[in-house]
Image (cartoon, rainbow, N blue to C red):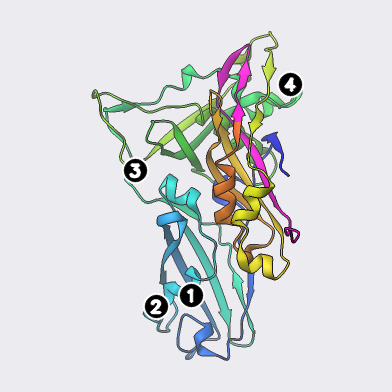
Amino acid sequence: MMWLAVLATVLSGVSEEQEISRVIPLNIAHPDARPFESFGAVDTVTVEYWCRFGARGYPDCTASTTDPITLRPDAGDWLETRISPRPDYMEAGLKRRFVYRWRRDSDQVEGVTDGRRRLGFVGERLEGPDWEVRATDVDPIVGFDGIREASREELKGVVPMSCGVRADGYLSLCISERPVAQGLESTRFDAAARVAANLRVRMSGAGEAVAPGTYVQVEIELDPARLGGSRPRVRQPRVTSSYDSMSMTAVYPHGARMNQQGGNVAFECTTPAETGPLENCTVIGDTNPRWGFVAPSFDLIRQTVTAPYTINGRPVRTRVRQLVRWEVPRNP
């Protein structure tokens, strides 16, 4: 039904997760299939979208373009009807950037990757003397666990990132402050993200709370010299309870079931430092995005309870991958 694995690499960080849809087949001869009236004097049109995510993660998108064409007043609706809800973005206060290109001589619209940041925070940056984050509280093995000793020196360095702040002060989803390529940079970012999952904002004022959507900028230093010569006793997190087939059947998307469609939704989540539900889950893959599996997958993933990851018996938070497999229910 599902699997749990300590994260080894990420898809270029949270900011570079798998595109929901790179190419959407459309009949561009029909004007309602475009967020603009006509091509005018140009042969290609590029539209940039920024989407915020509201109740249950449903998108609210605004559109803009630098091309000499006129966008429809409801241009944002074009994308809102074509992407899945993202409760993870809503909870973390994230907004998402999409760019699409239309060509006069093609019946497809193309997803554009231009190297610019694709995620941002809706709220304000937390700065000034009223808060602190102490990375020295985190055991250094958290970042290097699962990394071969011979490779740890290659990860040495400082990783700047921006992270959302949960209501309890813990950092949630983090965005790299610099481009993250596959390979060494991806592994380094992942190691830093495991450390960040254990960081907690401490406000100087008693009883002060962090506003929803607030984020902080932090620098995570990875230094294998801090590990010393001893080998710690590490116990990986494990699932203690989760959803069952009846729970899946109850929330199976009606359209997908009627059309005999299944799929997999992959997540990255944080296991808490005590036995409890997974936290800070974000989608990193959706194999069948047309059929609405993302929203009910979040309903299920929140039912997954794990025992904590421990180092020398001390429980700490860590990042894991979780997969929700959707198989068409058999008729009773």
Q: Which of marks 3 and 2 precedes in the sequence?
A: 2
Q: Position of residue 200 (x, y in %)?
A: 42, 27
Mark 1 residue element: helix
Residue 122 shows in the view = yes
- Identify the image quadrant of residue 69: bottom left
For the C terminus, the image quarter is: bottom right
Q: Which of marks 4 and 2 precedes in the sequence?
A: 2
Q: Position of residue 159 (x, y in %)?
A: 53, 34
Q: Residue 138 colored magenta? A: no
Residue to which mark 4 is pinned: 149
Front one among 25 and 160:
25
For the N terminus, the image quarter is: top right
Residue 22 shows in the view = no
Mark 4 residue element: helix
Residue to which mark 2 is pinned: 74
Q: Residue 313 colored magenta? A: yes
